[in-house]
Amino acid sequence: MKRALLVIDVQNEYFTGKLPVSWPVGSLEKILNAMDAAKTQGIPVAVIQHRAIKEDSPVFRFRSLEWELHPEIAGRPRNIVIEKTLPGSFTGTELESWLKESKIDTVTISGYMTQMCCDTTARQAFHRGYKVEFLSDATGTLAFSNNAGSVTAEELHRAILVTQAQRFSTVMKTSEWIDGIGS
């Protein structure tokens, strides 16, 4: 098994912008732990950065403070930074070619948001034949309300984890993942 850690959209938008991630508490720390463990174990890290297509977008506006990577992520080693404009990290990006060049067969999902870019990327990876690991406490979300209803951050996060574990991914805590890569 040769894996890569995907660190998806850990950008200021989720900390100081319009979409403050609230669940699970401590998800950023878990993402940083996963990045540090990956470096120690020689696991390649792909940092993925979302950019709004529209120049006047209220979120992820290109070159805005909110678009920038969280400083803790920006300061850590990574093998590649991949820019995307849609929820799936494979869509219109070089992710798959990088994974193939690196002979990766397993991707580990971390980052934001659980139900959007993390879920979409995990499903895309599964559909392409990759084994997928989904870090339950190193992904996160916030509560949402729209014309379809309302959901708490905890409910939304849990529902995605249950769905991922049903078919697409091996869902685990970051500490379990770190223990597994170290043995």
Image (spheres, rainbow, N blue to C red):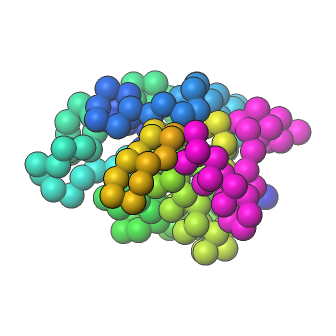
| Image location (x, y in percent) of residue 11 | 37, 36
Count of numbered labels shown in the rendering: 0
Residue 181 on the magenta segment: yes
User: Residue 24 sits in which quadrant?
Assistant: top right
Q: Residue furthest right?
A: 183
Range of magenta residues: 154-183
Instruction: Name the side, left or right, on which 64 lies relative to 71.
Output: left
| Image location (x, y in percent) of residue 59 | 24, 43
User: Residue 148 sits in which quadrant?
Assistant: bottom left
Position of the C terminus, as image quadrant, is top right
Residue shown at the point (58%, 25%) measured from the top left: 26
Q: Is residue 101 visible?
A: no
| Nearest the eye: 163 or 132 | 163
Q: Is residue 143 visible?
A: yes
Instruction: Name the side, left or right, on which 129 lies relative to 46.
Output: right
Position of the N terminus, as image quadrant, is bottom right
| Nearest the eye: 181 or 127 | 127
| Image location (x, y in percent) of residue 90 | 46, 65
Instruction: Name the side, left or right, on which 40 lies relative to 116.
Output: right
Residue shown at the point (64%, 47%) measured from the top left: 158
